[in-house]
């Protein structure tokens, strides 16, 4: 694992360490708690990623591990990466048959062109704007040509920013960045990734903001 040095990474890691147990209790029942469209998009991502097997898939910001486990049931060789050691510990206990690692999506400890796919559900929301392009460039570096990326995030105006100092009764220092799909797409394409599809759905259940899903790919080496 490479050292975490940026202030926002340290604050995000400390915050999720503080709320890991409560967060896992609240959000460990995916896909049962997800909307049908969300599940279908993850399934579509899995079909695209299977084309690049046996190259593994990385679930970045894997949290309590339920999405990683679901991808495993879909037949993918998958592992999870999370910034929070406590969250990784909870995921390892819940799914001992799977691999989970402490790390940052901004600097993946992986060789070039080794991943058959990347999924990041609601984890880029903690990456500041000035780090988003380099994060997606890191995705491009580790993906094999043609491999897919699926992002999900709360959609909002690019100026929207939320700082939370308390959650689940714990003191934290966690920043959330809401962005439009166009803003995120500009960073994806700027990093050399190619947009495959975009979907925005309206809030479901207790959600307050629309959910954006972007499916992208690292361009294939030859003609598609």
Image (cartoon, rainbow, N blue to C red):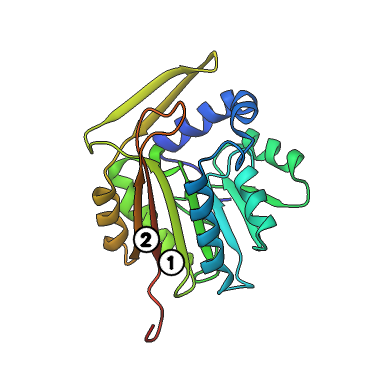
Alpha carbons under labels 1 and 2: distance apart: 6 Å
How far across and down, in percent of the image, does residue 190 sit? 26, 61
Q: Name the residue: 60% across, 47% down.
A: 67
How far across and down, in percent of the image, does residue 96 sit? 78, 46
- Secondary structure of the residue carrying tag 1 is helix
Examine the rendering and report whether any part of residue 116 can be seen. Answer: no
12, above or below 113, in the image: above
18, above or below 9, in the image: above
> Count the marks: how many?
2
Crowd class of label 2 (few under 14; some 14 to 19; many from 20; radius 10 Å): some
Q: Name the residue: 35% across, 37% down.
A: 210
Q: Name the residue: 67% across, 56% down.
A: 72
Q: Which residue is mark 2?
A: 137
Crowd class of label 1 (few under 14; some 14 to 19; many from 20; radius 10 Å): many
Q: Which mark is residue 181?
A: none
Q: Name the residue: 45% across, 41% down.
A: 122
Q: Are marks 1 and 2 in contact (CB under 8 Å)?
A: yes
Examine the rendering and report whether any part of residue 66 can be seen. Answer: yes
Nearer to us in this view, 7 or 143: 143
- Secondary structure of the residue carrying tag 2 is helix
How far across and down, in percent of the image, does residue 57 sit? 58, 61
Q: Which mark is residue 141?
A: 1
Left or right: 75 in relation to 33: right
99, above or below 147, in the image: above
Nearer to us in this view, 10 or 120: 120
């Amino acid at each position: 694992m490479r050292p975490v040095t940026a202030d926002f990474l340290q604050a995000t890691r400390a915050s999720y360490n503080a709320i890991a147990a409560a967060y896992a209790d609240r959000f460990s029942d995916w896909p049962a708690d997800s909307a049908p469209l969300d599940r279908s998009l993850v399934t579509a991502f899995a079909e695209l990623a299977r084309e690049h097997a046996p190259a593994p898939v990385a679930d970045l910001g894997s949290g309590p591990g339920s999405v990683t486990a679901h991808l495993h049931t879909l037949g993918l060789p998958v592992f999870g990466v999370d910034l929070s050691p406590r969250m990784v510990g909870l995921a390892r206990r819940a799914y001992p048959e799977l691999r989970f690692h402490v790390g940052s999506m901004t600097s993946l400890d992986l060789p070039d062109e080794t991943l058959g796919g990347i999924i990041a559900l609601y984890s880029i929301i903690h990456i500041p704007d000035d780090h988003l392009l380099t994060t997606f460039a890191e995705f491009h570096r580790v993906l094999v040509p043609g491999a897919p990326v699926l992002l999900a995030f709360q959609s909002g105006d690019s100026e929207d920013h939320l700082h939370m100092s308390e959650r689940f009764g714990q003191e934290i220092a966690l920043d959330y960045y809401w962005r439009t799909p166009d803003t995120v797409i500009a960073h994806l394409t700027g990093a050399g990734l190619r947009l495959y599809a975009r979907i925005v759905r309206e809030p479901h259940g207790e959600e307050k903001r629309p959910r954006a899903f972007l499916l992208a790919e690292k361009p294939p080496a030859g003609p598609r």
